[in-house]
Amino acid sequence: MDNKKSFWNVLTQYKIEIPKIQRDYAQGRTDEKTKPLVNIFLTDIRKSLDDGEPINLDFVYGKVTDSTLIPIDGQQRLTTLFLLHWYFAVKENKLSEEVKGVLRKFTYETRLSSRDFCAGLVEHGGDYQNLFDNKGTNDIQSAIIDSAWYFLSWKYDPTIVSMLNMIDTIHSIFAGLPNHIFEKLISDSAPITFYFLPMEDFKLTDELYIKMNARGKQLTDFENFKTLFSEYFNIENKAKLDNEWLDIFWKIEVKNAEKDKGELYTHNVDRFYYRFLQNMTALFYTENNAAQKDYIDNYPLFKEYKAVYDQNEYIQQIVSILNALITYHDNENLLRKFISDNPNYWERIRFYALARYFIWQQNSSSTKQAEKEYVYQCWMRITKNLINNTPIEGPEDYKKAIESIKELSIHIADMYEYASNSGNQISFFAGIQKDEEMLKAQLILKDAKWFPLLERIENHFYFDGQIGFMLVYARDKKGEYSQKDFERYANKLEKLFSPEFQENHNFLFQRALLSKGNYLIQPDWHHSFCNFDASLRAKRDNWRKVFNDPKRTLIIKTLLDDITSDDILDELNRIIKTSSVNDWRKLIIDNGENIAYCKNRYLSFDSDKVYLISKVRMSSRHRELFSYGLYLNFFKGHDYPPFSSVWYYESTSYGEPCTVLDGFIYAAYTFYMDIQHTGKKNYTIIFGNRKYTGIPDEVINLLKDLDFTIYAASCKLSNIPETKVTETVRKICTNLQQLS
């Protein structure tokens, strides 16, 4: 069967009925997105009619029932062709009863008004012949609206409004053509054709009918673009645009609906499809052009697609990628992330690496699935590790990453061999990760049993491919690597960096680690206990500074060596209880609440003082570690009369954090006493009046007897050893009680 048909061929054979389920006619809309596309479409048709060069308008699918064609895909083009044929029939005085009889066979069932309008156009078309001069300046739309047969209520029918706009657009573009165009349109050699595919003949399913007609009433970005993009494909691949390739994204929406237990939103399918083409084209574009952030985030597909796809290699590549995605199981959600609302650099480049594999697979001479699977595992594992563990800070880094992946893809079939050779250079990616991948490739090539061990711990959500420090733990004095030792250390680290241990169990992990040494890192002016945020930036500024520091990573190893049973909770508690640390770390080891207080896990050192920072900066609330420890051990929950309350002052920008004894009232004055750590485990006691209005002589005399230094509004007792603080405070309180 010859599937190439003209509009007139089809209309003489069938009645064309736009079903109720279909969207409104939209090609006549005047919005910024639709109008330029329609102008391109009509200009191409005019060129064809002018010079006789054939033009094919892609596929038209439909169900044929009792000699009636119900379009599934192609409604917009068919309607425009109907109006074009009507225009030239009227313009050239060819609207005979015979021609009317054929044109009457095109009708709309979406609304009665749309159906009646189409019938009215055909019936009364001859009334407008006098308007069709060759200047293309007459307002045909207004003449139709002013006609007696036109109902004013039709202005609310979007299909009719769009048709009227299209008639004027057609007139503006085609008015200058000579006569005899209508004869060209209805001849057996009509230059404007499309591929007509009855569903019954081509075994297209009712499911496809549902999919294609349930996309919503408004033309999608993808539908607008598809008309242009399909010109690059052969007949086989054009058919896939709305079948096998469409199903890739249809399945994603089905999974979304199942996950959310909601309805299928079929307009999402085209949105996913369009976003895929947009993002993939942006990657292709960046291969050969400077990286532009606007193009990365929102590639102007309608405007720039020719710059990419006029190069035939990219058409072949996009076909390879789409064909591979038909059977691809997106277990790591690479595709889903790639077509999400705002994929980041890493997600884009991860998918690009997958796409390079698909391209290789298409061109591979290998026929063995096992071989292809092995290549896939090697390639995706190494590229994932390189990508996920390299900072990509902007468009330039993004482009360099793309270039490096493309360069590496030349060696995709022997990736381990290539990566294991220190003489082979891998551009752009982080040096520490490139070195690690070289070592792991060497180990795997030497003994394949390394692969499952490495892959398992690489897939841990926190380590995410960077596990070189564990390999250091498993290396003996001869430089040999032990699988047994590696697995032993890896098993412990998997548990310690699991969600269970990260921020739970009163920070047993961090406290036990401090008992083995000062592992704290210094990302800035402050120090950090390290948080467990799994973003690359956060990991790089936290635990990876520990992993990759020769001294600090040994502290972790020491802790791991001291964990001798599978009950890690018991082991950590044992290590903490038996700790012999006696410096500032002891206060942290003994009390996990000190870590909990530091929401961002920051602390700061100032001489012999240690400040626990509640948020990010010292301008936020903060405690002094030693004075707070003293407060918890000796003051919190204890009474110190004549003071009525005891509390801890958390400073911001004013004053030193300290224990406060408050509420001593004497002679109408209210007095306080601050106990501040001044360094080297020495303390200062400050006695004062809350209103700074002076201190009675009898109080001053009492404090003098206790060796206080007297100032205008306060008194100070300095250089009190930590071991003497509570004794000193009790003595002061006892003497103050004598005044009452």
Image (cartoon, rainbow, N blue to C red):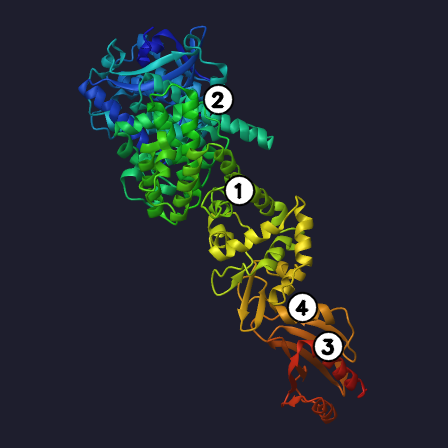
Where is residue 260 shown, x and y percent of the image? 59, 33
- Secondary element type, mark 3: helix
Kind of residue at badge 4: Gly
Classify 666 as above or below 265: below
Where is residue 631 shown, x and y percent of the image? 69, 70
Whether residues under marks 4 and 2 lie with C-beta atoms below 8 angstroms apart, the answer is no
- Secondary element type, mark 1: helix
Whether residues under marks 1 and 3 lie with C-beta atoms below 8 angstroms apart, the answer is no
The residue to which callout 2 is attached is 211
Kind of residue at badge 2: Lys
The residue to which callout 4 is attached is 629
Q: Residue furthest front?
A: 478
- Name which quarter of the figure residue 599 lies in: bottom right
Between the residue at mark 3 and the residue at mark 4, the CA separation in whole angstroms equals 13 Å
Between the residue at mark 4 and the residue at mark 1, the CA separation in whole angstroms equals 40 Å
Badge 3: how crowded within 10 Å, few (<14), some, or many (20+)?
Answer: some
Where is residue 413 shown, x and y percent of the image? 36, 29
Q: Quadrant of the N terminus?
A: top left
Whether residues under marks 2 and 1 lie with C-beta atoms below 8 angstroms apart, the answer is no
Q: Quadrant of the C terminus?
A: bottom right
218 or 703, which is in the foreground? 703
Between the residue at mark 1 and the residue at mark 3, the CA separation in whole angstroms equals 51 Å
Kindly report which numbered mark, 3 or 2, lies closer to the viewer in this rendering: 3
Kind of residue at badge 1: Phe
Between the residue at mark 4 and the residue at mark 2, the CA separation in whole angstroms equals 68 Å
133 or 445, which is in the foreground? 445
**Label ID, residue 661:** none
Badge 1: how crowded within 10 Å, few (<14), some, or many (20+)?
Answer: some
Whether residues under marks 3 and 2 lie with C-beta atoms below 8 angstroms apart, the answer is no
The residue to which callout 1 is attached is 486
Say whether residue 659 is visible.
yes
